[in-house]
Image (spheres, grey):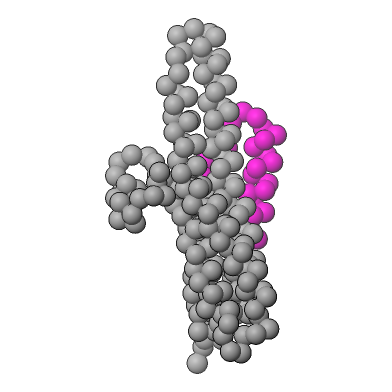
Amino acid sequence: MLADLTVKDFLDKVACSDPVPGGGSIAALDGALASALSTMVARLTVGKKGYEASEEVMQHAQTITLRLLDEFIALIDKDSAAYNEVFACFKLPKTTDEENAARSAAIQEATKQAALVPLEVARKALDMMSVIADVARLGNRNAVTDACVAMMSARSAVLGALLNVRINLGSLKDRDFVLQLQTEADTIEQTACRREKELLDAVNQDLRV
């Protein structure tokens, strides 16, 4: 399992010539990093003097970000598995018309799944951006820049995942499926970029001296 590797071993594996883990798994890793970092900010707020009014929000935020952390970790391997399934389908026999038809159908189905996995990453990362915004707004001010880095990591998770959605859609013949995912991907991207900008603009304004 990729998620069980040390950081160095994982990076070495990414750096090798194998196509997995690739950009989709890295997008999921970005989501996991955003989850962990936003959890840290929430925990640095709970129980601190002056943040009593934020206690309930921070406790709830931790519940969400820790759940998402586990889900993103699982998606690191899930994305690589989806790619491997597509690759395996291309190796299916194609000596007869029946084999060709079965191979083509298998490739199409596997490619759909390879698009849906990164879409799941993007959806979860977008959801988490709302939580991160609350953590940044109400959390420990000494860790507000950590919340910003979490937000940037979440945005990277969204954009990286959506690129992997789109490249898979280009191989699909089901136009209704393609249009549905393209439309959702565009909406997710626009919303993610807006959420990141809103937070960074506000924090940068506060940090100016």
Rendered location of residue 114, percent (x, y): 53, 37
Q: Residue at x 46, y 44 (%)?
A: 77
Q: Residue furthest bottom?
A: 209
Between 48 and 68, the one nearer to me in the picture: 48
Q: Examine the rendering and report whether any part of residue 57 can be seen.
A: yes
Rendered location of residue 64, percent (x, y): 62, 62
Q: Quadrant of residue 178?
A: top right
Give the main secondary structure, helix, strand or loop, of the magenta stretch: helix
For the record, the magenta segment spans 164-192
Does 180 lie within the magenta span? yes
**In the image, is residue 108 above or below residue 126?**
above
Q: Residue at x 46, y 55 (%)?
A: 29
Q: Residue furthest top?
A: 96
**In the image, is residue 86 above or below residue 195?**
above
- Position of the N terminus, as image quadrant, is top left
Rendered location of residue 192, percent (x, y): 61, 61
Q: Quadrant of residue 194?
A: bottom right
Q: Examine the rendering and report whether any part of residue 194 can be seen.
A: no
Q: Along the horizontal axis of the image, is 124 left or right of 29?
A: right
